[in-house]
Structures are given as C-alpha cells and as structure tokens.
Amino acid sequence: MPRPITTRFAPSPTGALHLGNARTALFNWLHARKRGGRFLLRIEDTDRARSEETQVGALIAELTWLGLDWDAGPDREDAAGPYRQSERSGVYAAAWQRLLEQGLGYPCYCTPLELELARKAALSAGRPPRYAGTCAHLDASERAARAAEGRPASLRFRVTPGEAIEYVDLVRGPQRFLADDLGDFIVRRADGGAAFLFCNIIDDAAMGVTEVLRGEDHVANTPRQLLIARALGLKAPAYGHLPLLVGADGAPLSKRHGSASVRDLRQAGYLPEAVVNLLARLGHSYQAEGWQERAELIAHFDLAALGRAPAHFDPVQLTHWQKEAVQRASPAALEHWARGRVPPGQEAAFIAGLRANLVLPADAATWAPIVYGELPCATGEVRDAIVTAGAGYFTAALAASAGKADYARLVASLKAATGLAGRALFRPLRAALTQRFDGPELAQLLALMPPAVVAARFGAARELSTRPVSLDETPTR
C-alpha cells in the first residue's frame, strides 16, 4: 500500500523567515494539500550556537499569518515526534552507532586548519575538494594516540568508491553523482552535534516524509543523504530542488532588493493573501494569470509547472497583488489601518471611502489628516488654482456646503454661481479641500469630511484668494 503524500518544512531558528524559505514552505504545503496528504513542521535546531528560542515562536507566527497550517509539529506532537531536533539526540546516537558497527562510520581527528589546507591543495592541483581520507584507515592505537592529544573527533561516513548515485529529481529530472567526487563526509560534528544532512534524512524517514521540495543549494546534499538512507535501511523521500529566488539584478534576494523577510512585509502592512499570490508564482506557472483564492492555488498547483531558472522577485508585482488583496479584503481586515488616525467610529467609513486609494497602512496615515485634520497654507500650483478661482467661488462653496455638504448640490451651485465647468470648476474645488490634484473621488471625500472641516477649508481658500500677494508668494504660472 503506497504511503500517503507527506511533505514538510524544516527551518532552522537562526533568523527571520525570509521569502525564499517562505516560498519553499508554501510549495510543500500546496503540494500536500492538493494530494490530500500531510504537511509537517520540524524545527532543525541542532546548531546550538546560532539557534534562538525566540525565533521558533517567530517562525510559527509568520507561517500562521501566511495561512500555512501543519498537521504535526513542535506545537502539535504526534507519535513520530518530537519535532524539534534538539530533542532527538537519542535517535541520532543510535544511528551513529549502527554506522560504526557496520564499518560505515569512523572518527576523524583532523583539525579545521588541516582540512582547509588539504582543501586548498586539492583545488590548486585541479582535484575536487573532497576529504582525502586521512583518518579513514587509522588503527585502534593511532586513534587512541590522537584522542590522548586531546583532539576532538567528528564522525565521518565511509563512501564506497567507484559507484554512482542516481535519482530522479522532482524538478530537475534524472540526476547522477559519482561517489569518488563526494569523499567521506561528516555526519557528527566534533562538538557532538548532528550534521544537517544526517539528522535531516534520519528525521524525514522517521516521520514518514515522502516528498521534499527544497532549494537547489541542497542538490549536493542529496546523494550523501541517499547513501545514509541506504546504509541504515531507511526509506528516503523523493527530492525536488527549487530554483533560487533572486532580485531584479539576478543576485540572491536580500535586504537591498527591498523587504526580504515575511516579518518585514507583515510589519509594512502587506496582506498574507497578497504575499501568497506572489510567492506561488515565483518558480511555478499558473495558467490563470489573475488573482486566485487559496483553494484555487491548491487545485492548480502542479510539480510539472515548477521551473528550473532562477525566479525573480519584483516589488512592483508585490504591489500589484497587494492592491488586489486590499480590494478583496473585508472591512474588518483593514479597519486597524485607520484606528487611532480617524475619529472613533469612523474607521469603517474611512476605509470604504478610500479603499481604491489604499495600498498600505502608510496610505491611510497620509489621507487621514487630509480628511479630518488641518492643512497648512496652500503653496505652489495648489495656491495658484485657489487664487485663480477667486473669492466669489469660495463664497458660493461656503453657502452651498452649509450643514452637511452634498457633492451634487455643491457642484450644481458652483456652476450656477460662477459659470465655470470642467477643469476650471473642479480643480480649485479639489485644491481647496485636499491641497492635492489626485486621490479619491471628491464625492467620497466630501461624504467623509466633517462639516466643520469643509467650512474651514473653503474659508481658508476664500481668505487666501483675497489676500495681497507678497513677493515671496508670487504664484508660479
């Protein structure tokens, strides 16, 4: 009976969740959900020096914000757990012992300096920089002598020379590696900690992981992990290696390309649906180009649609999907953007009236004072438009907007009183009310503005249009 599809995301808690890892998590989640399988979260925290407990909570929070739920993980243990590698040392110790008993593992006493010198010598000679096998055939007395010197020992996996390791990559197709190019590799560090490639395959097998999508920087680990699995009689997952996520300049994505972590985007006010719609298309092709709800992203996810070329992160595309998400978001999802910036109780009306002009919370911060606050004295082209309209224009505007202003009545009254139409009619009206020539429809803004604010804006405009112009206030034409 075939095993159920099980994928996983296995981050190290050493920093913020960056977009490349978030995409990896998303693709594994989409694949599992489409196939009716399981998605696991495992925390790979064997690097004691760099792992931070606060980052575990942060990773869980960011994945939850993205909507990537998992079936088992450090916060929902099952029989295959624990899902923190720092709590699985006994599992790894037993596997190391089996390798030693089979003669497939041996202690290595080489120091970092010795290894680096050997690596440089191999490169200069045109050879692959693999381990030279210095400690591969030490006898018991030689090992005891090195141990007596106080040399810490790592544990290496003994690679059988002359064979080829082959597998079919879920993304890249058939792959073939020569054992002679690998060299004996470390499975336990000199400090006693499990090497990444070792505990990673041990846990995948123990947790029933059947398919793994991960970054192409892990390609070189795969043949080594397949050797470990074979030696220990474990069922290895099928691997698929995703293309790198890069910026517009082709370099690996980083802070210089804009927000490079999920936390950055969340704090800036991007909506999770926007981030997911973008990431789902970075290295994966959907036939439908437009917005897709989560169920559609799942239904149309296809391993055959995964690309091999680097995927380019474009902030312009992120803004596009954010606009799409804002237009679809419930008022409740956006009201916190306005909270504390508009009069209490006006949040929903403010968001509804300006939704088409809001992309991020910073936009709400820009428009709130324009709708409810005090504006500085008009200058430049805004001042020119007000002065050109003249005091009579704003006297008529004040009269027509007495009480609660009605946009249609206000426009009709201004036309009748001034004889103006088109640009000559509307430009000074927008200038007086907002000191801008762009933005939401005036009817929407006027409906939001308190009567006292409208009266103050028209009064200030009338005063400005009758005030003598000083030399430093000469309008620019």
Image (tube, grey):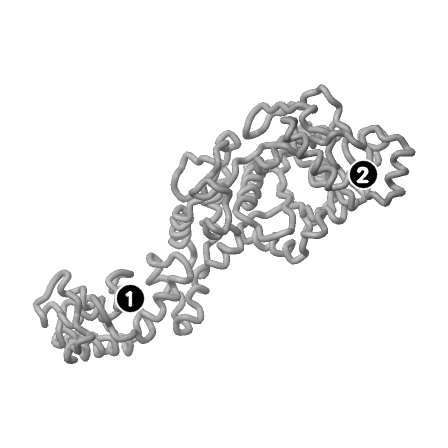
Quadrant in which residue 219 is drawn: top right
Q: Please tell me whether mark 1 sits on a helix, a strand or a loop.
A: helix
Residue 325, position as x, y percentages in the image: 42, 51
- Which image quarter holds the C terminus? bottom left
Residue that protrudes farthest toward the right in the picture: 141
Q: CA distance from mark 2 to mark 1?
A: 75 Å
Residue 104 placement, left or right of 242: right
Residue 147, position as x, y percentages in the image: 87, 41
Residue that numbered label 2 is attached to: 109
How many other residues sit within 10 Å of disc 2, few (<14), some (14-19) or many (≥20)? Answer: some
Q: Give the residue drawn at x 46%, y 40%.
A: 250
Residue that numbered label 1 is attached to: 445
Residue 279, position as x, y percentages in the image: 48, 44
Along the polypeptide, which appears first: circle 2 or circle 1? Answer: 2
Q: Give the residue drawn at x 41%, y 34%.
A: 287
Type of the residue with mark 1: Leu
Residue 300, position as x, y percentages in the image: 48, 36
How many other residues sit within 10 Å of disc 1, few (<14), some (14-19) or many (≥20)? Answer: many
320 or 174, which is in the foreground? 174
Q: Is residue 417 visible?
A: yes
